[in-house]
Amino acid sequence: MNRFMKAAILEAKKGITSGHGGPFGSVIVKDGKIVAKGHNEVIKNQDATCHGEMMAIRKASKKLKTFDLSGCELYTTAEPCPMCLGAILWANISKVYFGCNIGDTENIGFRDKVFYEMTENKKNEFILELDREQCLKLFKEYESIQDKQNY
């Protein structure tokens, strides 16, 4: 067994036994060393964004003092949901290794599949464009700022 995946599994078990949430644990590795661990804390924090990957990204960013996690790898017990995948991409994580897939997650009662299906259909009744011109003005204001960081 891969040592980093083993650490992710142990992190998930920590969350399960503490009653924090589902069986989702993650570790972020840089230069062959674990820089952060996270597990699902949705129940503990009553916050739907507290997935294992998100918790690990937050901790790694704080520890490394950057939102740019280029050169880092993420090991996680389950295939990342769309929210976590988005965060992984925004953080510039170089590679992701996962244990269980979306079907495995669905088999134990989680509904990740529905989110993947929803994001595949861009035109639906849930995501609608509104007040684009006003928002474009905001974007132009941001674009005019000289000292900005893209993230």
Image (spheres, rainbow, N blue to C red):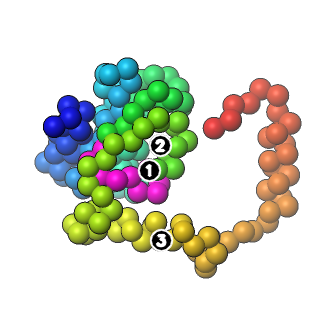
Kind of residue sitting beneath label 2:
Ile
Can you see residue 119?
yes
Q: Is residue 123 left or right of residue 54?
A: right
Which badge, 3 or 2, is on the more N-terminal residue? 2
User: In this figure, which residue is indicated by the disc labeled 1?
Assistant: 84
Which of the 4 image quadrants contains residue 95? top left
Q: Is residue 16 left or right of residue 52?
A: left
Kind of residue sitting beneath label 3:
Glu
Q: How many marks?
A: 3
Residue 88 falls inside the magenta stretch? no
Rate crowding at label 1 as few (under 14), some (14 to 19) or many (20 or more) other CA atoms within 10 Å.
some
Magenta region: 76-84
Kind of residue sitting beneath label 1:
Cys
Q: Is residue 82 left or right of residue 13?
A: right
Where's residue 60, x and y in %? 41, 30
Location of the N terminus (image quadrant) = top left
Farthest bottom residue? 125
Report the front residue among 38 and 77: 77
Where's residue 87, x and y in %? 49, 45
Can you see residue 44?
no
Name the mark on residue 117.
Answer: 3
* Secondary element at image label 1: helix
* Secondary element at image label 2: helix
Looking at the image, which residue is at 81% across and 49% down? Answer: 138
Q: Are marks 2 and 1 in contact (CB under 8 Å)?
A: yes
Q: Is residue 123 above or below residue 31?
A: below
